[in-house]
Image (cartoon, rainbow, N blue to C red):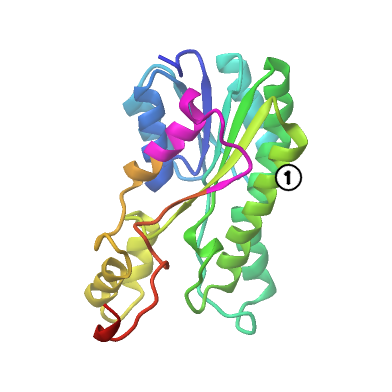
Amino acid sequence: MFFKHKTVVVTGGAKGIGAACSRLFHRENAQVVILDTDTQGAQLAAELGDRALFVACDVSNEIQVIQALKHAADTFGRVDILINNAGIQRYSTVTDTTEAEWDLVMNVNLKSAFLCAKHAIPLMQQQGAGVIVNVSSVQAFISQKNVAPYVTSKTALLGLTRSIAVDYGPQIRCVAVCPGTIDTPMLRDAIQLSPDPEAVYQECVDMHLVKRIGTPEEVAALILFLSGEHGGFCTGQSFRVDGGLGITIAGSKRSE
């Protein structure tokens, strides 16, 4: 019952990890506010029923963020937990990336987290407590090729996480969660760009020590833990939920 009467705001809450968070926190008795530009968020809020609210919001737009958080606070009386989950992926190197593509990725993946935190923190301070979870990526630590804007944005989220934790503790905790390959619509769409989607999917499976990709529900479970009373000693840190991705060095059979 820890989350009863607490309000959780989930950006990008309509699909994937965001939707899994929305469902899990709602099941744990929280009041859930889904921020998204995708109207599937309205369907999810209707599915959840009482204690769920959808607000159409471009979280890279400050005016819309201010209005959305005010709507959340006016509806439920408070904002306790912010999950900065909204994100997009674009595939390009530094020399291939256009300025417009760079700005788009930075706005959605990084600027949105800054804006939502900026305007959620004063609401949390009024209550004397709050938690912010920034959804980064395992690619804040390791990187595949051809994802320069994405990797940069997700790495920068770790710095934002530390800064919030240092500047606003002890009232407000801030942590980052860094998923590996997760079975989300974004992943499925990316795989379909390949001429051999099945082979790419299998490559994703094989990269992880657990020999599978993760589920949105597994990421949501970690976020729930870090947001609650049992995660109360965690702040300023990043937590990988990545199936062991990137911690081994390939070698010959003789090294086994």
The residue at the point 59 percent across, 30 percent down is 131
Relative horizontal placement of residue 122, taking residue 227 as reference (left or right): right
Closer to us: 158 or 251:
251
The residue at the point 63 percent across, 53 percent down is 157
Closer to us: 82 or 167:
167
**In what quadrant of the picture does the C terminus appear?**
bottom left
Q: Position of residue 72 (x, y in %)?
A: 58, 23
Instruction: Label 1, secondary structure: give it.
Output: helix
Crowd class of label 1 (few under 14; some 14 to 19; many from 20; radius 10 Å)? some
From this view, report whether residue 102 is shown above or below residue 253. Answer: above
Relative horizontal placement of residue 118, taking residue 247 as reference (left or right): right
**In what quadrant of the picture does the N terminus appear?**
top left
* Res. 212 in view: yes
Q: Position of residue 189 (x, y in %)?
A: 36, 64
Closer to us: 160 or 22:
160
Q: Position of residue 95 (x, y in %)?
A: 64, 84
Which region is colored magenta? 221-238
The residue at the point 41 percent across, 58 percent down is 180
Kind of residue indicated by mark 1: Ser
Which image quadrant for residue 69? top right
Judge whether residue 128 is colored magenta: no
* Res. 60 in view: no
Closer to us: 161 or 236:
236
Which image quadrant for residue 218? top left
From this view, report whether residue 206 is shown above or below residue 220. Answer: below
- What residue did someone put label 1 on? 163
The residue at the point 43 percent across, 18 percent down is 51
From this view, report whether residue 105 is shown above or below residue 229. Answer: below
Q: Position of residue 158 (x, y in %)?
A: 63, 53
